[in-house]
Image (cartoon, coloured by chain):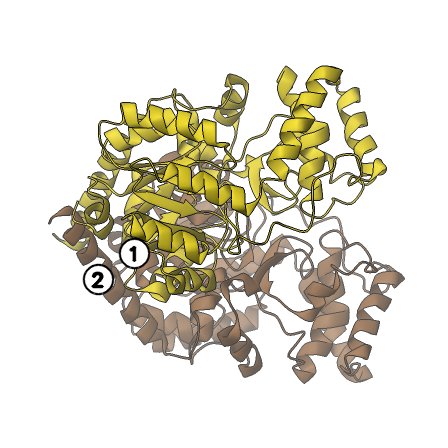
Chain colours: A yellow, B brown
Amino acid sequence: MKNKLCEMFGIDVPIFAFSHCRDVVVEVSKAGGMGVLGMARMDPDRVEEELNWIDAHIEGRPYGIDVLMSGNVEDSGDLKYDPEKLLPQEHVRFVRDMLDKAGVPPLPEAEEQQIMRDMVKGMNFTPRESLEMVERAMSHPIKLIVNALGTPPAQLIERAHSKGIKIAALAGKARHAIKHKEAGCDFVIAVGTEAGGHTGDISSLVLWPNIVDAVDPMPVLGGGGVGRGRQFAAALALGCEGVWCGSIWLKTVQSEVPPEIKSKMFEAAADDAILTRSVTGKPCRTLNNTFSKAWNAEDAPAMLPAPLQNYLWWQEGRSRVERVRAKEFLTYPVGQIVGDMTEETSVKEVVYDFINELLDSKERLDGMLGE
Amino acid sequence: MKNKLCEMFGIDVPIFAFSHCRDVVVEVSKAGGMGVLGMARMDPDRVEEELNWIDAHIEGRPYGIDVLMSGNVEDSGDLKYDPEKLLPQEHVRFVRDMLDKAGVPPLPEAEEQQIMRDMVKGMNFTPRESLEMVERAMSHPIKLIVNALGTPPAQLIERAHSKGIKIAALAGKARHAIKHKEAGCDFVIAVGTEAGGHTGDISSLVLWPNIVDAVDPMPVLGGGGVGRGRQFAAALALGCEGVWCGSIWLKTVQSEVPPEIKSKMFEAAADDAILTRSVTGKPCRTLNNTFSKAWNAEDAPAMLPAPLQNYLWWQEGRSRVERVRAKEFLTYPVGQIVGDMTEETSVKEVVYDFINELLDSKERLDGMLGE
């Protein structure tokens, strides 16, 4: 395809695949797109392990990483995670009772302590540690760094550019996209409300052209609601240079999600991907589940502000639920496209279906409007 | 354009314009699209007046009407509107205090009584009266009836078809669209969450192709988030045969909305079109306003169930607010596309911009994918 982003990265099709799973990253890049590994909070050993594996399998194709960095690396947050002190007893009891009643066993003490240690470490991950993690990643042949937590810090942009690495950031509003552009990003990723994970209120159909115009002539990737070739065609028609997608890879054989969550996804309709504060404390689109529904009950306590609600779910809910894979409570961030996910396929099939349906859509437009 | 809906109605472009304003209907049809008059609850004299005017000005071009009919015409609803009895005093006081504090004067008694009479009449409008209204409309050369309240009643579909009139219905989920198809509709209108007015949760980008596949080969119009040519191109790329739009006409010189609301729209961002239960009791996307915000306050009473919340706004809020055009309280159903509405233009300009931008989008795709 003749396209700014294909030229920028030397890829065949501007399909940018966000995934926490290194297999997906490798397969997408090998199929002609661009795999982007979600790193979140990885310690240096894990970074080496994941990226070494990718380097060994990706056959020299380009790939990127996705990080969560606040704009100010000195800002380490004003709330240190301390599981003993932060959570109100009423809320802890509410979650414990809920799981007890549903027959989800409590964690064995040894496991609980290990989980707590891991959590405290994860929660207290500082922007400084994030920067070190990215620095480590930059010793690998990464071609792109995406920041999912606002405008990247100036020193990261400078450092990436000095190594010939492109940098981009997610935006849910035009004014955020303009900030990214002014800070020196190479492109922006416009993410509509239908996306999985933390998301805003504006739909892709309205947001994308809005951001395209706001940062013109900078390239824009359309994210949120993209899972097939027709949406890829729509993104290009709306002025985007390509697509950003994450949810669709969860259904693949390569995906990291456990079979119990996968089967929940295959049964889900588009509106089972609900936008809820219950899991992270911020609006996050995730698979509907008993925990999220419970907060709507009349006798439920009010949800805690972020990040406390997140701590509550991690500390009291998630580990207990995932340990026994209690299906009704299992959840995973996923977009409305989940309604289209009905069976397991390979990453390669998803990419090829994307391209074929894009071409069908093009033919359809040619037929209506003359070639 | 070569297109099923262009053939069905003998129109040049498949832009279907919903409007309560007869001027908009006439201008869209004259510009090559299809104007559809929102009738809601009109008495027979008003039907005659509106449609006679349209017939006199539309120069023989096709047009349609949009109605609100429940599937069962015998179902007259179980809740008769009686302003003296239905509304809890706590809620009435909450709204009165809010407006008193904001300096919005109470209604003069004579006006209040007239408004009450009109309201009681409107609220108690029966499905039977709706059917009579449509019967009256069918004595005019209408070419299309759209039902915005679910699958049209069987007798309406039969009656319309016997007169050569096409019939369609709105759907926010695939299963509703399938019901419309099975009942005998000629096409369906898939409406995403970004639309103005009553709307569901699923975004257009996800919903449209979903419904296209569900009712294939029946034609589908894409509605919700459509205000310009790029979205028109996206709708065609996503498998739709055309677009359904309402909000965008509100900004035109022909539009029915008062200047105070228009200027609020020109200042609004996409996420000022909020999905709220505060105005009608059901999720309705409308311009953010002080009344809607007030229900989020900690000391606010819980919102009433539909249709009581609607009665409350009509009886205690709307008339008082609109009489003096109290800007902070003024609202109007509008979609997220409101963020793109920044100045008044003519209906004809909107239609021509739609077509030009559609062609630009097509050219863009040609450039990327080869002609």
Residue at (52, 71) in percent of width and height: B268
User: Measured along the vertical axis of the image, is residue B326 above or below residue A44?
Assistant: below
The picture places residue A136, in percent across and down from the top left corner, at 41, 37
Q: CA gap, disc 1 to disc 2?
A: 17 Å
Residue at (76, 69) in percent of width and height: B315
State left or right for residue B49 relative to residue B92.
left
Label 2 element class: helix
State left or right for residue A357 relative to residue B280.
left
**Chain at tag 1:** A
Q: Mark 1 points at which residue?
A: A219
The picture places residue B158, in percent across and down from the top left corner, at 44, 45
Residue at (40, 46) in percent of width and height: A146
Q: Name the residue under label 2.
A: B360
Q: Which amino acid does label 2 sit on?
A: Asp
Give the mark toward the camera: 1 or 2: 1
Label 1 element class: loop
